Image (cartoon, rainbow, N blue to C red):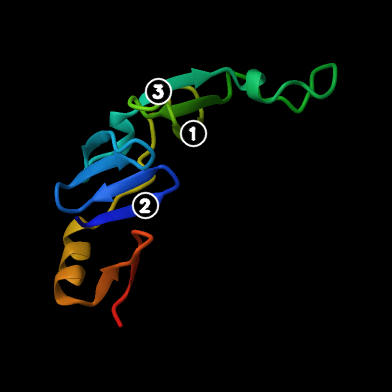
Amino acid sequence: MARLHIAEYLDADLDTERWHCHDCDRDLGPLRENYKRGLLVAERDPREVHPPVLEGEFTFAPKSDWVRIIEFYCPGCGRQVESEYLPPGHPLTQDTQLDVDAIKRRLATGAVRINDDHKLEAAR
């Protein structure tokens, strides 16, 4: 199985071209699409995460009309996979996009291989 460890809680299965949770192996959707579509989404009030430090107008706490905190969770095991800070109304970002065809070509030619840690490395 050609499984790559992409991020702390995110794997890419090159054989099936699917995203997977690294912890529970839950299928998170097509590898050529945004993995966040396969995750549960929660919006947090930034003041819950960053409570005010000072009294008054300037508290060092973000204002919810300027920023929102979006958290992404695996629907299988509940592991928090990602979070992002976005202005209200901003669409979710796509922070990871793999060139699946190029990776597969390089694996097929032997230019790279997947090591025991499920990471790409130059072939020896």
Nearer mark to the viewer, of 3 and 2: 2
Residue at 71% in and 25% down:
61
Which of pointers 2 and 1 lies earlier in the amino acid sequence?
A: 2
In this rendering, position of residue 59 left or right of residue 63:
right
Nearer mark to the viewer, of 2 and 1: 2
Residue at 84% in and 22% down:
54
Q: Position of residue 103 (x, y in %)?
A: 22, 63
Amino acid type at mark 2? Ile
Q: CA distance from mark 3 to mark 2?
A: 20 Å
Look at the numbered discs 3 and 2 and tell me whether their residues touch, using CB distance below 8 Å: no
Q: Position of residue 84 (x, y in %)?
A: 49, 34
Which of pointers 1 and 3 lies earlier in the amino acid sequence?
A: 3
Look at the numbered discs 2 and 1 and tell me whether their residues touch, using CB distance below 8 Å: no
In this rendering, position of residue 20 left or right of residue 54:
left
Amino acid type at mark 3? Val
Mark number displayed over residue 50: none
Q: Which residue is tagged 3?
A: 41
The C terminus is located in which quarter? Answer: bottom left
Nearer to us in this view, 43 or 10? 10
Q: Position of residue 65 (x, y in %)?
A: 58, 18
Badge 1 crowding class, 10 Å Cα cut-off, few under 14, some 14 to 19, many 20 or more, is some
Q: Which residue is tagged 1?
A: 83
**Where on the picture, by quarter, is residue 44?**
top right
Q: Which residue is tagged 2?
A: 6
Residue at 36% in and 44% down:
10
The image shows residue 113, relative to residue 37, as above or below, that is below
The N terminus is located in which quarter? Answer: bottom left
